Amino acid sequence: MSTPRFAVTQGIDHLRDNLGGAAASRKDKLNTFDGVFIPVALSIWGIIVVGLLGTVLLFSGGYLITSSTTLSISAICSNGLVKGGGAYYLISRSLGPEFGGSIGLLYSLATVLTGSMSVVGFVEPFLDSFGKDSGSLGNVFEESRPWRILYGTVLLAICGFISFLGSKLFAKASLVLAGILSVSTISVILSLLFRPPFSNDMVNLTGFSLETLYGNLYPSFTNEFGQEQSFRTIFAIIFPACTGILAGAAMSGDLKYPSKAIPKGTLGAVGFTFIAYMILAVVLAGSVDRKTLHENFGVLQDTAFYPELVVIGVLSAAFFTALGAIVGAAKMLQAISKDGLLGVLTPFAYGRPKDNEPVTAITLILVLIEIMVLIADDINQIAPFVTMFCLLTFGITNLACFILRVTGAPNFRPSFHYFSWESALFGLVSCFSAMVYVDTLYSSISFIVFVSLFFAIHFFAPAKDDWGDVSQSIIYHQVRKYLLQLDSRKDHVKFWRPQILLLVNSPLKHYKLIKKGGLFVLGHTIVGEFDDVSPIFKKQVHSWLRFVDLLHLKAFVNVTIAKDERIGAQSLLMGSGLGGMRPNIVVLGFHKNNTPAISEPSKSTSITTLSEQTSDDEHSGSIFTDPPIDTTPFDPSKFYYDHSLSDTDIDLLNTLPLDQSKISSESYVGIIEDAIKLEKAVAVMRGLERLEWFTGEKIKDDRKGRSGSVYSGSEGEGEPLLPKYVVLGVKKQKFIDLWPIQIHDEMHPEAAFGKNL
């Protein structure tokens, strides 16, 4: 009774940590408005006009992608407990560490690039307003390249200072910036609608009119930065303005109720910013002529009642995006590092003791953004990379939601119901199609980086069995689907496959008999009363599964409990397999003198070739006794051995608690009789200890520190059951003769030697 009690105690402690402890600290966390809505809205906000129809079309396409992704995010978030890490946590706990880790690292990099864009986007309008040569509001600051880098560095220092102080200050700063940006946006719209028309060398404000609206209705692309602009290039530039939907999810560890806050806040922000974008696009296209829109990037400032408000609003938006990028990327990097996916990231797993703020990760993100600012001083040079990494992240998020829905995973029961597998599939296809549409080269590079990270995590990260893996749900769904289509009544001799049920007594000694086939089932009976042996049943099943894993066998395990071996074998014969995949061949060893039926080459202090072994008659009539010890020195050139098992694997196999029992002659014969009655083919193996296994590979004695005998000793001497060196044979290839005997059909009593024998 102690084990269940311990489990209950653990469960209570876990519940207290996740509910009681979390409830006690919720008062210090963020709610939906300041933790999700404001960060998402500020991260999305920006102003770009490419003709009214072009603007509506491009933003609608971008918002269709982000909206479908938002539905998928909302579904996954509302399905259970959400911890820190944002998109990384959502994907890794759905698709596994490989997908989650690779996408988390890529999205962190995309966030770093977004922060770099924001820094550059802050410096440009800042100098347009206050630059010594081109400032419209004052001529104060130098505009050369070194000074631009210095201004960006100062901005980063301020953002870093706020980030180091913690999420609460970040949330308060977000509210202030959101207020400033709201006032600025409202003043822009009112100025365009109600300011009297005027015209100068820089601006031609016509006031809102249908004539001006029609003149700006269709797109007109120009040649900028040495490249002819098009829908593809403009989409790559404006799509990052739509990628802020994960800004709220990035704060998941700081939210009071992330499962509720992320869906509500993200959807609200997406809807609000889309409406604001459309209103501003229509008003701007109907109030300013095309020439001004093409040539004057500061048109909103030049047409405003209060230009200072516009400048402050633009700078506030850029400042917040940079600040949000630093905080979001650092928290995601900390979550990845905590899970130990890549050892090189371990230093970034630690946070400040009092509040767990990722100070080391923040420092790294600041350095990376500074490097990007030094490399690129133009927003349009960075935007395509952000677009690719964000689209890849969105696509994998939709993939996770799609798989969870179509496979009918019973644990996927989100409280958010406004999604479907169709919406997730649309988001998945749209994201990957948009990647290829924007730039085939960049999309290919992004996929290569993603696959490289995927395999790096797969091979070097420790196993995360407690996370769950949606691949098992996919496999189950597909296996069930095709098993139902596999009808045993439609079997045909041309497509016959061996489906073997191997009844083996000593698995550690006979493991080399287990090879792959159409279907391989390892059957084992635990003899005894059910109530007496049921406590060891689960342990035995686990041991057999571990046995199969260590030897890399393509086999299934079927363990049963019975009063004797024959009843157990009957259960295995009738219950093994499923649907059309049931064993059609029963393999068991030749029974003699109650000794283990099947045997591999005997373990002795040295190995002999077939010509050096004694004959069967010299074994006193038993083929199961060990041959006489041969003192001939071991010659590696004559033999082959299996490289697949390491010493560690062998040591583990020797410790597995696989029970071994002896079977009576009556039960043995009864098992064969039962198999024949059930129309199974029966294979009885005899004399395999004399078989010289051939693999075609010569022995290479490359294991350091090994000398002397090939086998470590015999079972009777108390040595391990499995040899350290697994000898598979000599250089000369041998064959096995099979003698099929057809005794399945019923025979007349008088035809003792009838046609079926």
Image (cartoon, helix red, strand yellow):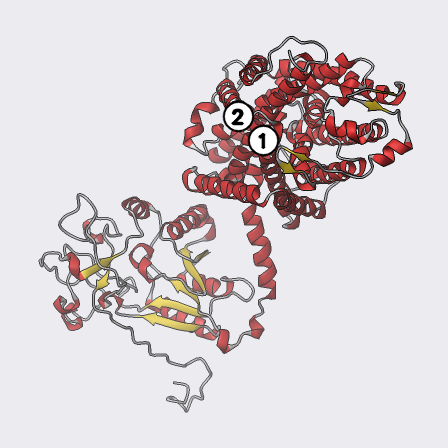
Badge 1 marks a residue whose secondary structure is helix
- In the image: residue 301, left or right of residue 20: right
Residue at image location 38% in from the left, 53% down from the top: 552
Q: Where residue 347 is drawn, which disc sits there? A: none
Examine the rendering and report whether any part of residue 685 can be seen. yes
Examine the rendering and report whether any part of residue 47 can be seen. no
Say whether disc 1 or disc 2 marks the residue closer to the N-terminus: 2
- List the residue tagged with mark 2: 372
**Farthest front residue in view:** 201
Residue at image location 43% in from the left, 47% down from the top: 542
Compared to 690, does 648 lie above or below?
Answer: above
Viewport quadrant of the C terminus: bottom left
Neighbours of disc 2 within 10 Å: few (<14), some (14-19), many (20+): some
Residue at image location 44% in from the left, 71% down from the top: 675
Can you give x and y, in whole percent of width and height, for residue 514 in the image?
36, 61
Can you give x and y, in whole percent of width and height, for residue 644 in the image?
31, 52
Q: Nearer the viewer, residue 669 or 332?
A: 332
The three-letter code of the residue at mark 2 reads Met
- List the residue tagged with mark 1: 382
The three-letter code of the residue at mark 1 reads Ile
- In the image: residue 366, left or right of residue 74: left
Badge 2 marks a residue whose secondary structure is helix
Can you give x and y, in whole percent of width and height, for residue 157 in the image?
55, 13
Q: CA distance from mark 1 to mark 2?
A: 9 Å
**Farthest bottom residue in view:** 750
